[in-house]
């Protein structure tokens, strides 16, 4: 792996860690707006396509249904 690829991989790891630390562990969904583009569309074989608003809704439901849930990396 070259230096540029390693730097990019490290940057991607920081984004993923921030996603889990901020959105799930700290329960701060506002971070989604900083990480994802407003026109984000996710693709899931299990759930089909979903928007950022739908992801935000589903995360809020998860937090409400499992208030004691912990996310640890």
Image (tube, grey):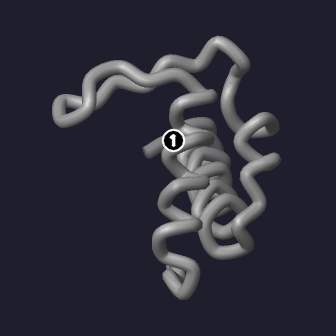
Q: Which residue occupies 54% across, 47% down?
A: 9
For the N terminus, which image quadrant? top left
Quadrant of res 33: top right
Q: Of helix, strand and loop, which one carries label 1?
A: loop
Front-most of residues 65 and 40: 65
Left-right relation of 32 to 69: right
Front-most of residues 23 and 18: 23
Is residue 72 in view? Answer: no
User: How far from the left and from the top, in percent, is residue 58?
Assistant: 50, 46
Q: Which residue occupies 59% across, 46% down?
A: 12
User: How far from the left and from the top, in percent, is residue 2?
Assistant: 51, 41
Q: Looking at the image, is 21 positioned above or below residue 54?
A: below
Front-most of residues 64 and 39: 64
Q: Give the number of callouts.
A: 1
Q: Looking at the image, is 38 positioned above or below residue 44?
A: above
Q: Residue furthest top?
A: 39
Q: Residue furthest left?
A: 45
Quadrant of res 50: top left
Q: Which residue occupies 62% across, 37% down?
A: 4
User: How far from the left and from the top, in percent, is residue 31?
Assistant: 78, 48
Is residue 63 in view? Answer: yes
Q: Residues within 10 Å of mark 1 (few under 14, many from 20)?
A: few
Q: Looking at the image, is 43 positioned above or below residue 2?
A: above
Left-right relation of 32 to 66: right
Q: Which residue occupies 54% across, 87% down?
A: 68
Residue denoted by label 1:
2
């Amino acid at each position: 792996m070259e230096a540029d690829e390693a730097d990019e991989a490290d940057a991607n790891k920081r984004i993923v860690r921030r996603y889990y630390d901020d959105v799930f562990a700290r329960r701060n969904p506002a971070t989604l707006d900083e990480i994802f583009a407003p026109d984000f569309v996710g693709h899931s074989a299990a759930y089909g396509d979903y928007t950022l608003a739908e992801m935000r809704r589903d995360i809020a439901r998860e937090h409400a249904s499992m208030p004691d849930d912990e996310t640890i990396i």
